[in-house]
């Protein structure tokens, strides 16, 4: 074989290798940035201060299914939700349409779950879907309900972990809304006790009179404890 043929073969091999690398990169990018652990969860331990303890994360980083992307540059806050059913088991959390959730069953009281990565857009909060992360609290809480202390503690810890993890991705979380503010069909979501003991003690700004779409302002009895 002539020297010029060797050179040409080498050039073609190099070109094909580069093309393959570009195509592989494009495939990974188009398929998203996480792998669903399919019913399993990974224990992640935090050691510092008010984050300390174990959370359960239902995904790991890597090429995964394509999902609609949330633009992290737009995100500034959290939308707080109650599930609105009395209780759900630990298995229900990995199917939750929320970025974070907190358990309330006898098997996972106060457990924090990280269900979706922050760059995943979720149909969770109506008008708040583009600029807030969603936090779903297990339980059914009416006007006079008292949320168990372990659930309140879990929710406050979830907010601190969301802030900490969001900061790593260049997202600053400085405000919190109730789902009700974005949807009049969710008038009881998250309800007065979660609002007072979680949102108003989270250190995040609240805007009780701000609404979007057909959302509702927060009623006075959510903002101050008027119970006897
Ligand atoms: Zn909700």
Image (cartoon, helix red, strand yellow):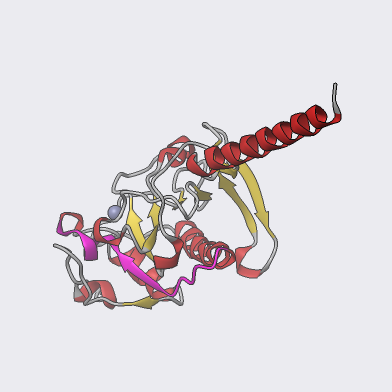
Q: Is residue 198 above or below residue 4?
A: below
Is 51 left or right of 144, judged from the image as shown?
right
Quadrant in the rendering for residue 141: bottom left
Is 69 left or right of 108, judged from the image as shown?
left
Quadrant in the rendering for residue 188: bottom left
Question: In what quadrant of the picture does the C terminus appear?
Answer: bottom left
Locate residue 103, reporting x and y percent: 46, 48
Q: Nearer the viewer, residue 49 or 162?
A: 162
Is 123 left or right of 149, judged from the image as shown?
left
Q: Is residue 46 above or below residue 62?
A: below
Whether residue 63 appears in this view of the structure is no
Q: Nearer the viewer, residue 34 or 205?
A: 34
Please tell me whether residue 74 belongs to the stretch shown in magenta: no
Residue drawn where x is 80% and y is 34% of the image: 7
Please tell me whether residue 182 belongs to the stretch shown in magenta: yes
Whether residue 125 appears in this view of the structure is yes
Quadrant in the rendering for residue 214: bottom left
Is 173 left or right of 220, judged from the image as shown?
right
Residue drawn where x is 51% and y is 50% of the image: 114
Range of the magenta residues?
169-184
Ligand 1 image position (quadrant): bottom left
Locate residue 143, reporting x and y percent: 23, 62
Locate residue 69, reporting x and y percent: 41, 51
Locate residue 160, reporting x and y percent: 53, 67
Question: In what quadrant of the picture does the N terminus appear?
Answer: top right
Residue drawn where x is 28% and y is 66% of the image: 192
């Amino acid at each position: 074989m002539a020297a010029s043929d060797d050179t040409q073969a080498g050039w073609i091999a190099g070109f094909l290798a580069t093309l393959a690398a570009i195509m592989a990169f494009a495939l990974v990018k188009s398929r998203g940035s996480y792998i669903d652990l399919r019913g399993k969860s990974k224990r992640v331990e935090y050691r510092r201060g008010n984050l300390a303890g174990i959370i359960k994360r239902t995904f790991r980083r890597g090429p995964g299914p394509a999902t609609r992307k949330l633009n992290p540059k737009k995100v500034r806050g959290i939308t707080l939700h109650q599930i609105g059913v009395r209780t759900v088991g630990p298995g229900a959390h990995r199917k939750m349409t929320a970025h974070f959730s907190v358990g309330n069953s006898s098997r996972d009281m106060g457990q924090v779950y990280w269900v979706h990565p922050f760059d995943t857009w979720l149909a969770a909060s109506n008008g708040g879907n583009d600029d807030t992360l969603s936090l779903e609290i297990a339980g059914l809480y009416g006007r006079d309900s008292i949320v168990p202390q372990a659930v309140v503690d879990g929710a406050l810890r979830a907010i601190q972990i969301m802030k900490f993890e969001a900061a790593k991705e260049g997202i600053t979380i400085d405000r919190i809304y109730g789902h009700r503010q974005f949807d009049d069909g969710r008038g009881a979501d998250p309800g007065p006790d979660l609002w007072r003991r979680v949102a108003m003690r989270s250190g995040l700004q609240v805007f009780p009179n701000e609404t979007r779409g057909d959302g509702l302002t927060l009623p006075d009895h959510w903002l101050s404890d008027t119970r006897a």
